[in-house]
Image: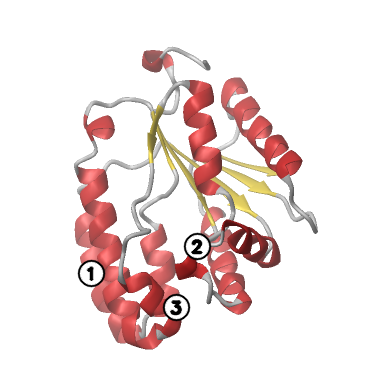
Amino acid sequence: MLLPNQQFVFKYICIEGNIGNGKTTIAKRLSEELKIQFLGEEFENNPLLPLFYQHPEKYAFPLELSFLLDRYRQLKNSEFLLKNEVVVSDYFIEKCEYFASLNLSETEYQDFHGIYSFLVKDLKSPDLIIFIHTSAENALGNIKKRNRSFEANIPLEYLKKTAVKYEQNSQLDREAIVINFYLKELDSTTYERLFTEIVSLLKSGINAKTLTVQV
């Protein structure tokens, strides 16, 4: 265990990164290793998701809005956050903006942004965000390995666009750890190194507002 909860420097930690980057696996491992609460994103039962991958223009706006509302409700009602417990989550609600800016028309995005801005001001902000970056090719390989039916039609070009969006937003002036691992092939050993690096950084503390690490 890192520290007793009441002494933990970061009370609300978000793991972020592209689709297929291993966010949930890392967040769950941190929860177990550090004996802190895990707050996982609830998205797999969204009926609009497979429809979006088949017909993106038709279903983009209702999908992005449904994700925003679902994430807002989950964070607003989280017992862990309400009790100010130490929490690690596998998403940061700002991702709603990333995907909306990519998937929506300009008019749709303006409408979406207005709703987003109104809702998020009511939510607790994370104390630390850990951005995990790898190549779109690696992300696609991970997606194929986990074999979720609704992800079967995700094109590589889409993952390249979302990867760029995540990289752009991870460089903003905020409390963050940015971890890059661009090896051609990823295996369990690579992710073990990644996990070990994150735990080491959390134990030693962060001396810079944004810390970039190569794995």
Between disc 1 and disc 3, whose residue precedes? 3
Which label is found at residue 165? none
Q: Is 92 positioned to the left or the right of 113 in the image?
A: right
Mark 1 highlights which residue?
A: 114
Residue drawn at (54%, 24%) of the image:
33
Q: Nearer the viewer, residue 156 or 176?
A: 156
Inspect this view and state whether residue 215 appears.
no
Residue drawn at (38%, 44%) of the image:
40
**Which quarter of the picture shows residue 157?**
bottom right
Residue type at numbered disc 1: Gly
Q: How does the figure colour the protein chain or chains? A: secondary structure
Q: Say which element carries label 1.
A: helix
Mark 2 highlights which residue?
A: 148
Q: Is 164 positioned to the left or the right of 78 in the image?
A: right
Residue drawn at (39%, 78%) of the image:
52
The crowding category of the residue bearing disc 2, from other C-alpha atoms within 10 Å (few below 14, some 14 to 19, many at least 20), is few
